[in-house]
Image: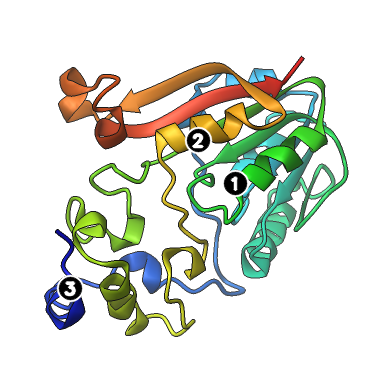
Amino acid sequence: MLIGGELGYRVLQHFPTPRSWQIRLSSVSAPTPGKLESYWGHDIWEELAGRTVIDFGCGTGADTIEIARHGAERVIGLDIVAEALAVAERAAERANVADRCCFQTTTTEKADAILCLDSFEHFSDPAGILRTMAGLLKPGGTVLVSFGPPWLHPYGGHSFSAFPWAHLIFTEKSLLRWRSHHCGDGATRFGEVRGGLNQMTIRRFERLVADSPLQIRDFEAIPIRPVRLLHNRLTREFFTSMVRCKLRLNS
């Protein structure tokens, strides 16, 4: 049973303000730490070396810059947040890789590999994103996707998960009312918050890929470590910490 109304709002007020609601990007902001190697292993650098790579949903550009530093021929960081792209551009200049990477909101350039880290749960039109990726991929190219936690994970509500499964216990209206006291963007739905939140589940992601021009080549639902023995096909929506997969164009 969902808790909403005045009761839900008052209960939520007792929890600390999520740090992500307090962050504001500025001219002195630095990229958040990259995650590519921790997600895909050290061999990822060799896999991307000498290639044209698109970092789809690059944020402040840490992974884009590291890909360029590890030998990629060209890296294109894509994001819709102008402030994040500005941070990325400044960081690329400081890292002396601005000649090999760029940051923009769209591209028509085709890539050997497309990366999408921690973004699929945020896209407002994930089906459209898959079609866009397919159109940007060179023949034989690969899309590497990792996202999480999925929506039914204990903290799948991201900043709305004040405690495990809080985003499923409280109504969307109560959670957004709580947020409105810290963020003045007027968002009234999960999908309207900065960065968006589309309530992505593992099953929904698989259906979206099946209906797209892409197909799954490798797929892994990585369990939450403390409950990994309980992780199986029936429980994976609740006990998966991250989805990691490789996609290819349908032949």
* Tag 1 secondary structure: helix
The Cα–Cα distance between marks 2 and 3, rounded to whole angstroms, is: 30 Å
Closer to the camera, 223 or 208?
208
Q: Which mark is residue 12?
A: 3
What distance separates the C-alpha of mark 2 from that of mark 1?
A: 9 Å
In the rendered image, which residue does mark 2 sit on? 205
Q: Position of residue 133 (x, y in %)?
A: 73, 38
Q: Residue at x 26, y 58 (%)?
A: 167
Crowding near pointer 3: few (<14 within 10 Å), some, many (20+)? some
Q: Mark 1 and mark 2 in contact (Cβ < 8 Å)?
A: yes
**Which amino acid type is marked by label 2?**
Phe
Of the image marks 2 and 1, the number of the one nearer the N terminus? 1
The three-letter amino acid code for the residue at tag 3 is Leu
Q: Residue furthest right?
A: 109
**Where 212 sits versus 231, above or below?**
below
Specify the label residue 126 is tagged with. Answer: 1
- Image position of 29 (left or right of 114): left
